Amino acid sequence: MTVSRGPLDRVLRYRRVIFWILACGYILVYFHRLCPAVVAVDMMRDLKAGGALIGFLGAAYFYPYAIMQLPAGLLADSWGPRNTITLFFGVAFIGSVILGLAPSAGWAIFGRTLVGLGAAMLFVPTLKVLAEWFRRDEFAGMTGILIAVGGVGTLTAATPLALLSAAVGWRMSFLAVGGITFLLVIVVWIFVRDRPSDFGWQSPAAEKKPEAAIPIGLAAGVRKVLTTPSFWPLACWFFFECSVFFSFGGLWGGPYLIQVYGLGKDQAGHILSMLAFGMIIGSPALSFFSNRVLRARKPVMVFSSAITLVLTALLTFYTARIPVAGLYLLCLLMGCFTNAIVVVAFTAAKELFPLQIAGTATGLVNLFPFAGGAVFQPALGYVLESQGRSGTAFTLAGYQYAFGVLFVCAVIALVSSLFLKETMARE
């Protein structure tokens, strides 16, 4: 239905509604992504799974998430974000229910795979919506707020999940989240629209350049992205930098705190919740620093990569000697410099390519961080298993070797950041 053209202030009001609905969806995406870290020990016990198998359970989210990033971009550009998010969040709802009811590790992996498949289709379509409803100079700031809101999902996957699972069990916790996911499906379908023109309104993001109206086909868009040399250092950076966050914050950080430091699940959850505060604080801060202070993308990403190297060095060489207060700070910095930094990285990815293929470009680059999580979560589980156990816990040597893998990832990410192309236009 075409609605008569409304004033710009109507667009500005309604886009806030759309943004916050999609931001709530991003909270669920991050919850699903990181929730195994707090309940991993309980799941290993109830599902009778070892480190390698629980690693594959954690990574089962990342495999479909990585694979679906290109389809997410293509569907966002062709079928539309609203249709894409509605359908696939319904799949995430089904997966969460299966995970909560799983009688075995195999069923749990299947359920988590469906969750990853559904959750994969929110972030890139949301960036497409932001590109349509917000001006170019607003995009980085709104993406920063989106990532910060995702930090709330990280927060709920730490202390609140630890408390909830202690009260009702991890199974009922996942069933409850499934119900919330289904509610969001309904809200997205009713309120979200792909672009202002769906209401007959003019878009604030409308380009004045005549070439902006020239469509770019799907195959041509993919080819343009993949044949752009500056795309590949960015992709490599995403793969290795985000692997650190997903491997530690998404799975093995919880068992490490419980088994090496002897902390209870609630205190481990408190420490892991600092990852969320790092995201919440770091996303808008790094966006502001990039946009307003340095007016550049590359220096911010190089600095973040250097901090990541220091953090992984501490985990590798001082594995059992970091003061508990230091663990809080380490997780705060990790949330900021291995995850919140992606707001700058995704803005750089968008700025490399025309608006017409914004979904395709961000979808392709977003494949790499989740491919990294899919590779390194089970890889660290294998390393932990290879060093044996002390009772039911993994050994200190196992964690030292596992974190050594993350240290190598941080080295490669830092080197990749040095080859990034500066994308912020100079006025």
Image (tube, helix red, strand yellow):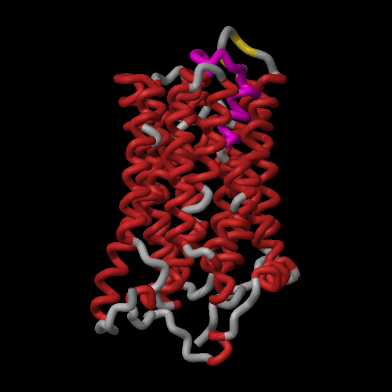
Q: Please, is residue 64 above or below residue 262 in the view?
A: below
- The x, y position of residue 420, in whole percent, is 66, 67
The answer to which of 25 and 190 lies nearer the viewer is 190
In the image, what residue occupies the spot 52% across and 20% down? Answer: 260
Residue 372 lies in the magenta stretch = no
- The x, y position of residue 34, in whole percent, is 47, 37
Q: Count the numbered circles shown.
A: 0
Inspect this view and state whether residue 256 appears: yes
- The x, y position of residue 360, in whole percent, is 60, 65
Outermost residue, top side = 391
In the image, what residue occupies the spot 66% across and 71% down? Answer: 221
Over which residues does the magenta segment extend?
44-60
- The x, y position of residue 217, in whole percent, is 65, 74
Quarter of the figure with residue 233: bottom right
What is the chief secondary structure element of the magenta stretch?
helix
The answer to which of 411 and 361 lies nearer the viewer is 361
Quarter of the figure with residue 383: top right
In the image, what residue occupies the spot 58% across and 89% down? Answer: 211
Residue 50 lies in the magenta stretch = yes
Outermost residue, front side = 1
Inspect this view and state whether residue 330 appears: no
Q: Please, is residue 50 above or below residue 403 in the view?
A: above
Q: Please, is residue 422 above or below residue 232 in the view?
A: below
| Figure quadrant of the N terminus | bottom left
The answer to which of 318 and 372 lies nearer the viewer is 372
In the image, what residue occupies the spot 36% across and 42% down? Answer: 182
